[in-house]
Image (cartoon, rainbow, N blue to C red):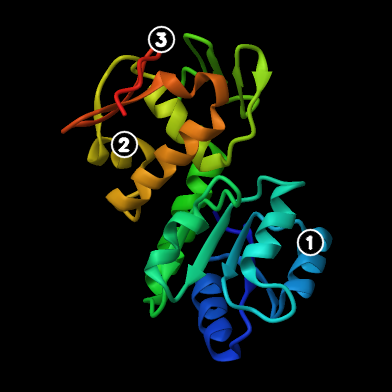
C-alpha cells in the first residue's frame, strides 16, 4: 500500500503529528486538515485514498463532513470518536463510515485499521468476481451491486461483506467467519452487527435476503425470509 494518500482530519496538532509520523513510517502519503471546511477543501483537491476523520472538529463536525462527502464519493472513511456509544451513528445508513476507532488509541492500531479498510476497499477478494443470488447481483470488477436491476449505494466495506456472503449462498456465517472473510482482525463483533444492520437497509427490496440465523450469525439466501 505504499504511496496511498491519507487525509488526516484532526484539530489537535499533537495527535495529528503522531498519526502522520506513524502513517508515513509505513509508506503512506498524508495530508492534514484541522477543521471541517478545510477537510472538504482537501478532499476535493487531493482525492485521498482514505480519510481518517475525527468526530469533534471545528467549523463543521466530522458527522457533517462525512454526510457531504458521501453525497458524492464512496472514499473509505475511518471515524475517530471519544465515545464508544457513537458506533451505531458512525457506521449508520445515513453516514456510511467504513470503520471506527475510539480514543484514546494506540497509533499502531490506527495504522492497522487504515490498512484493513484500504484492503477491503481495493478489492482483495479473489475470483470469482461476479455473484448472482436471488435478486442481488454483485460485480466486484466493476465494484457495483444491484437489486433486481437497480443499482445500490454501498460503501466499500458493505460491498465486500455482501460479496463474502454471496460467495456461499445459504451458508450460515458466524461473526468470526465474517471477520475472517473480510480479512480484517481489527473488526470486532459489534462492528459486524452494525454493518449487517446497515447493509440490510441499503439492500432495499433485497434486504430480506440477508437473514439472521439465531444463535449462529447471518446468511444470504436466494429467497428472503428474514429471521428477525
Which residue appears farthest toward the front when viewing the image? Answer: 228
Helix, strand or loop for disc 3 = loop
**Residue 127: percent from left, percent from top:** 46, 20
**Residue 31: percent from left, percent from top:** 69, 72
Please tell me how crowded label 1 is: few (under 14), some (14-19), or many (20+) other residues with Cα within 10 Å: few
Identify the residue under disc 1.
46
Callout in the foreground (3, 2): 3
In front: 17, or 207? 207
Instruction: State if disc 2 and disc 3 touch (CB < 8 Å).
Output: no
Disc 1/disc 3 C-alpha distance (Å):
41 Å
In front: 50, or 27? 50
Closer to the N terminus: mark 1 or mark 3?
A: 1
Callout in the foreground (1, 2): 2
Residue at (55%, 20%) from the top-left corner?
205
Give the quadrant of residue 176.
top left
Closer to the N terminus: mark 1 or mark 2?
A: 1
Identify the residue under disc 3.
222
Determine whether 108 is above or below 94 in the image: below
Determine whether 97 is above or below 225 in the image: below
Residue at (40%, 9%) from the top-left corner?
223
In the picture, the quarter occupied by the C terminus is: top left
Helix, strand or loop for disc 2 = helix
Disc 3/disc 2 C-alpha distance (Å):
19 Å
Residue 137 can be seen, yes or no: yes
Determine whether 94 is above or below 226 in the image: below
Residue at (48%, 35%) from the top-left corner?
199
**Residue 11: percent from left, percent from top:** 63, 84
Please tell me how crowded label 2 is: few (under 14), some (14-19), or many (20+) other residues with Cα within 10 Å: many
Q: Is residue 87 left or right of residue 179?
A: right
Residue 124 can be seen, yes or no: no
Identify the residue under disc 2.
178
Amino acid at each position: 500500500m505504499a504511496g496511498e494518500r491519507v487525509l488526516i482530519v484532526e484539530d489537535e496538532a499533537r495527535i495529528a503529528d503522531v498519526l502522520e509520523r506513524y502513517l508515513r513510517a509505513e509508506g503512506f502519503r498524508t495530508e492534514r486538515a484541522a477543521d471541517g471546511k478545510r477537510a472538504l477543501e482537501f478532499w476535493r483537491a487531493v482525492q485521498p485514498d482514505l480519510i481518517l476523520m475525527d468526530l469533534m472538529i471545528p467549523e463543521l463536525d466530522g458527522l457533517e463532513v462525512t454526510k457531504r462527502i458521501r453525497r458524492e464519493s464512496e472514499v473509505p472513511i475511518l471515524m475517530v470518536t471519544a465515545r464508544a456509544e457513537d458506533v451505531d451513528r458512525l457506521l449508520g445508513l445515513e453516514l456510511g463510515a467504513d470503520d471506527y476507532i475510539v480514543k484514546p488509541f494506540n497509533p499502531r492500531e490506527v495504522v492497522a485499521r487504515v490498512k484493513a479498510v484500504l484492503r477491503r476497499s481495493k478489492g482483495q477478494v479473489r475470483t470469482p468476481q461476479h455473484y448472482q443470488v436471488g435478486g442481488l447481483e454483485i460485480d466486484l470488477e466493476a465494484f457495483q451491486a444491484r437489486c433486481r436491476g437497480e443499482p445500490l449505494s454501498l460503501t466499500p466495506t458493505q460491498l465486500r461483506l455482501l460479496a463474502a456472503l454471496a460467495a456461499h449462498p445459504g451458508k450460515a456465517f458466524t461473526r468470526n467467519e465474517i471477520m475472517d472473510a473480510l480479512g480484517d482482525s481489527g473488526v470486532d463483533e459489534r462492528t459486524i452487527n452494525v454493518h449487517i444492520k446497515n447493509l440490510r437497509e441499503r439492500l432495499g427490496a433485497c434486504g430480506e435476503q440477508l437473514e439472521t440465523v439465531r444463535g449462529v450469525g447471518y446468511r444470504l439466501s436466494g429467497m428472503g425470509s428474514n429471521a428477525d
